[in-house]
């Protein structure tokens, strides 16, 4: 299908423009969405079944953090079907994105998506985050629905460079999670996010190591 004739093309382009993203990424994003919807019928990769809801709650929700993602290397921990890693990799082809997922059927989908979409800047690791033997390799890690802040750092903090950051998409109530941060880590910034078509409140919490005095 010519993606310009895709039933969700206009809606996606409006969302991309609202996020200050190039609509040129609409075609690979829709190809990814269609592939996810097709595989989801058999493999149950995500509880969301409706493509229009996937557009808002998966694609645009993932891309809402884009303007605060400036790092060159990113590990997406517990990425599931590739969220937010694949949308971010499509929107920022100069960034190197590593998708970390322990579920075999999900990693099979991820490898097929990377192959079909020609995402040369994406690699897939079938592993639990704590078992990834790449200490200090990444400038940023993220985990869209994996755990609380302290839990993400417990399994993935070793992957970060000394000045690397955790980019965590969260809802409005994060005071308790911030209080739980382990010694040596601190919140560097909190950015409010607006997801086109989604009324829920979102914010991006940026966590890094304490700078030595």
Image (cartoon, rainbow, N blue to C red):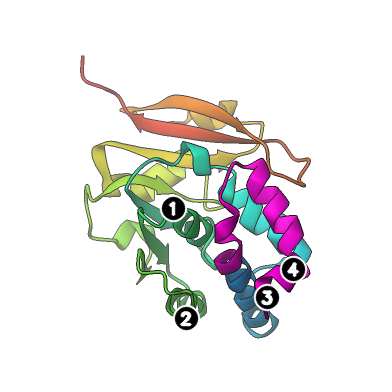
Q: Nearer the viewer, mark 4 or mark 1?
A: 1
Q: Position of residue 149 (x, y in %)?
A: 48, 39
Q: Secondary structure at mark 1?
A: loop
Q: Are marks 4 and 3 in contact (CB under 8 Å)?
A: yes
Residue 110's disc number = none
Residue at the extreme bottom: 42
Q: Which comes before the other along the chain, label 4 or label 1?
A: 4
- Distance from disc 2 to disc 1, alpha carbons, whole Å, reads 20 Å
Q: Earlier in the sequence, mark 2 or mark 3?
A: 3
Disc 2, SS = helix
Q: Which residues are magenta?
A: 1-29
Residue corresponding to mark 1 = 92
Neighbor class of circle 4 (other Cα within 10 Å; few <14, some 14-19, many 20+) is some
The CA distance from mark 4 to mark 3 is 7 Å
Image quadrant where one finds the N terminus? bottom right
Task: Look at the numbered disc 3 and give the secondary structure of its residue.
Answer: helix
User: Of the residues tagged 3 and 1, which is closer to the observer?
Assistant: 1
| Residue name at image x 55 percent, y 29 percent | 191
Q: Which label lies toward us, 2 or 1? A: 1
User: In the rendered structure, which disc, 3 or 1, sits on the residue that comes first in sequence?
Assistant: 3
Up-down: is 201 above or below 37?
above
The numbered mark at residue 37 is 3
Label 2, on which residue? 112
Q: Is residue 45 visible?
A: no
């Amino acid at each position: 299908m010519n993606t310009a004739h895709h039933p969700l093309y206009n809606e996606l382009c409006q969302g991309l423009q609202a996020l200050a993203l190039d609509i040129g990424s609409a075609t690979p994003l829709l190809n990814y969405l269609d592939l996810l919807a097709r595989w989801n019928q058999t493999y149950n990769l995500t509880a969301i079944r409706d493509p229009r809801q996937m557009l808002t709650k998966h694609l645009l929700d993932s891309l809402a953090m884009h303007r605060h993602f400036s790092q060159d290397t990113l590990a997406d921990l517990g990425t599931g079907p590739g969220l937010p890693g694949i949308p971010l990799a499509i929107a920022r082809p100069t960034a190197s994105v590593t998708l970390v997922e322990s579920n075999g059927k999900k990693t099979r989908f991820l490898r097929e998506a990377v192959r079909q979409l020609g995402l040369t800047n994406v690699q897939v690791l079938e592993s639990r985050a704590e078992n990834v033997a790449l200490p200090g390799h990444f400038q940023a890690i993220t985990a869209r629905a994996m755990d609380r802040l302290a839990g993400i750092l417990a399994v993935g903090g070793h992957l970060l460079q000394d000045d690397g950051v955790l980019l965590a998409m969260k809802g409005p109530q994060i005071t308790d999670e911030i209080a739980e941060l382990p010694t040596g880590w601190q919140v560097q910034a909190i950015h409010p996010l607006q997801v086109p078509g989604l009324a829920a409140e979102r914010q991006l919490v940026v966590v890094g190591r304490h700078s030595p005095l």
